[in-house]
Image (cartoon, grey):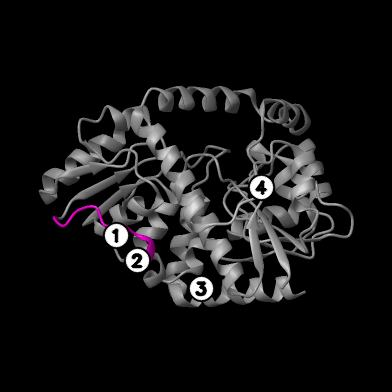
Amino acid sequence: MASVGIITFLHNENYGSSLQAYALQKTVAGLGFDCTHLNYCPDRGEKIRNLLQSGNSLKLIADGLRKRSVHAGQQGARDKREAIDAFYRKHMKLTPPCRNGKELRAAGAGMDILLCGSDQIWNPAWLNPAYFLTFAPKGQRKIAYAPSLGIQTLPNPRKIRMIRKWTEGFEAISVREEEGAKILRQMTGTQAEVMPDPVCLLSREEWRAVAEPVAEEPFLLCYFIGENAAYWERVREISRETGLPVRVAPVTAEAYRSGYELLSGMGPERFLGAVQSAALLCTDSFHGLVFATIFGVRTELLRRYREEDPESKNSRVDHFRRLMEKKSLPQLREEGRAWLARALEG
């Protein structure tokens, strides 16, 4: 049985990231491969080296520190982190922690295939060469399944040169959005196929088997990644219009201060259950939208970014909505699984 090592975001305390990682490993294992995630959690030195090498904005670092300070003061946020780690231990195979490129190289050395994806691991705003498998020795098979670039305009020339170099040597590359395929082609000349996010590779029944329902009575679930006072104005309007009580899966400081009932400290299983149980989901989250679609839950999608913002990531939700106008979820699942099977079998 051939072995596959996957690298993606595992430790950003995000339900969508955790669940897409789970879905990709489960799918690859179901195709007959011995599959393990490379447990990449970079230490401070690795983060500093990457900041200097990749030319990422110091503003991103400051924003990350600010958000972590919010989480540090919330018991629910700490419980959430522990619940996500428990989910990994229960449902997935992970290597020991890899704190830097050297440890990644050692962890992946015995793997027949290295696979990067999905999520926004190729977003130029926070480039990290590790997610392009630059630690792999020459000759090791490399595949990319549906990484998202998350942008609609070209990054600066320095980042284009790095991405062009780092994508050399891949056997097969797919990306998650049409916009990303276009930009990758402009930067590197690579014609990547567009494949669905890994959470679409599992059926509604498979997700229901993981979900832990949180309530029987109808409620309005709020799940916001961004901070925007207008979100909460809209929540109040919807609650008045529908009469639904509001429950919040908190991420931001605004959410913790919202005054509504908090579903804090949930792990991925209970997050799935909350979405599945909701009468209506109000969200700005890509994965929130996708899971609501999988479970057939009505969704009020709020746009997190201004359309003119060069760092806008609205293309993710726009692409998914276009897909749903053309194809069914079973079609997407079959296309994604077939692409993975072909790529892995070589």
Along the polypeptide, which appears first: circle 4 or circle 2? 4
Pointer 3 and pointer 1: residues touching (CB < 8 Å)?
Answer: no
Q: Is residue 183 above or below residue 257?
A: below
Instruction: Give the residues drawn in magenta, as a range.
Output: 208-217
Distance, label 3 to label 4, CA atoms, is 22 Å
- The residue labelled by disc 2 is 208
Pointer 4 and pointer 2: residues touching (CB < 8 Å)?
Answer: no
Label 4: which secondary element: loop
Distance, label 3 to label 1, CA atoms, is 19 Å
Q: Nearer the viewer, mark 3 or mark 1?
A: 1
**What predominant SS class does the magenta segment belong to?**
loop
Pointer 1 and pointer 2: residues touching (CB < 8 Å)?
Answer: yes
Label 2: which secondary element: helix
Residue in front for this viewpoint, 149 or 245: 245
Along the polypeptide, which appears first: circle 3 or circle 2? 2
Q: Residue at x 64, y 73 (%)?
A: 339
Q: Is residue 55 above or below residue 127?
A: above
Distance, label 4 to label 2, CA atoms, is 30 Å
- Position of 56 compared to 325: left or right? right
Q: Residue furthest right?
A: 138
- The residue labelled by disc 1 is 276
Label 3: which secondary element: helix
- Position of 76 compared to 103: left or right? left
- The residue labelled by disc 3 is 333
Q: Is residue 117 above or below residue 251?
A: below
Q: Is residue 175 magenta?
A: no
